[in-house]
Image (cartoon, rainbow, N blue to C red):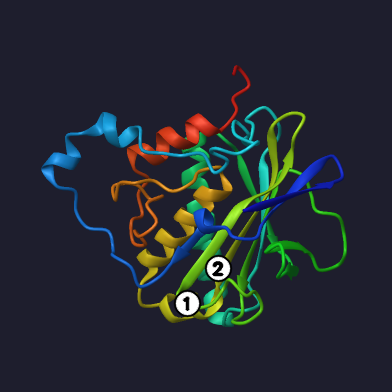
Amino acid sequence: MSDYRRRGRGFLVAVVVALAAILMIGLTPAGGDSPAQATNTPRIAADYRSFFADSALEGTGWTTCAGPITYSIDVRALRRAQRKREIKRVRWSMRQWARAGDLRVRFTGRERLRLDPVSHTLHPADGTVQRDRHVYISFVREGVDPLMVDPVAGLAMPARVSVAEREVIGGVALFRARHVRKLSKVDGRALKGLYLHELGHVFGLGHAERTENVMHPTVVRRTELGAGDRAGVRAVVKSCSG
C-alpha cells in the first residue's frame, strides 16, 4: 500500500507497507547454479519486475539524460572502525547498478540525516530541502523505525517521483545498524549482497523469482548481478533515446 503526496515538483512515495522493498535476514543463502539453471539464460533474463509494477506509476524510472545520481550516507549508528569499510561496500554496490543501467553516480560524502519513521524516508538533518537526483542512505539504530527490527535487514525504495515526466528524482535506503555491526568483519559478502539487493529497489526493481538474481528476496550473499538484474535495470531506466 502506497501513499503518494505532492512535494514540490515531484511526489514523495511513502511506502507504508513496503514488502516489495524489505529484505529479511536469516533466510536461504545463495548457492551455486545448477546446470539446468545456468543454461536457461533467456528465462533468467526475463526474471525482473518494476518497483512500480501494477501501479499508477508503472513505467516510471531514473533517466540517463540528466547529470549523475548523487548519494550521501549517514554512518553514525556504526562503530567508528566500521564506517569506512561499509561506505566502501555501499559505493561498490552503487557502481554495479550504475554500470548495468548505463547511469552515472557520484558519492557526495557523509551526511547527517533525519529519519521519518512514518514514511520511512530520510531528510537532511540541517533542514535543507531534499536534493533532486539524490539517494539518501542511512544505517538505522534499533527501534528508530518500526519496520527496521529483527529479522528485517534493510528497506529501500524510489522515494520521490516527478509524475509529469514519469521520472524518479530521489531514493532512500535504510540498513539496520545492529545487523551490519554484527557482520561487518566476519561476512562482508553477506553485506555486499544486502546492499546490492536494497539498492536494486532504489534503481527501480522489485523482487525477482529466481535465486540466480540479486533481487530474489531470500538471497542475501549473492554479490554478482544476474541476467535478470541486468536486463531489469536496463528496462526500468529511461534512456535518452527511449
Q: Which residue is mark 2?
A: 175
Figure check: 118 above or below 179? above
Q: Amino acid at mark 2?
A: Phe
List x then y, in percent, for residue 217: 39, 56
Q: Are marks 2 and 1 in contact (CB under 8 Å)?
A: yes
In the rendered view of the protein, which quadrant contains the C terminus? top right
Inspect this view and state whether residue 52 appears: yes
Q: Nearer the viewer, residue 232 or 131?
A: 232
Q: Nearer the viewer, residue 9 or 178?
A: 9
Q: Amino acid at mark 1?
A: His
Residue at the image point whose x is 49% and y is 46% from the top: 206
Q: Is residue 191 left or right of residue 221?
A: right
List x then y, in percent, for residue 189: 36, 64
Figure check: 55 above or below 143? above
Q: Which residue is mark 1?
A: 179
Which image quarter: residue 164?
A: top right
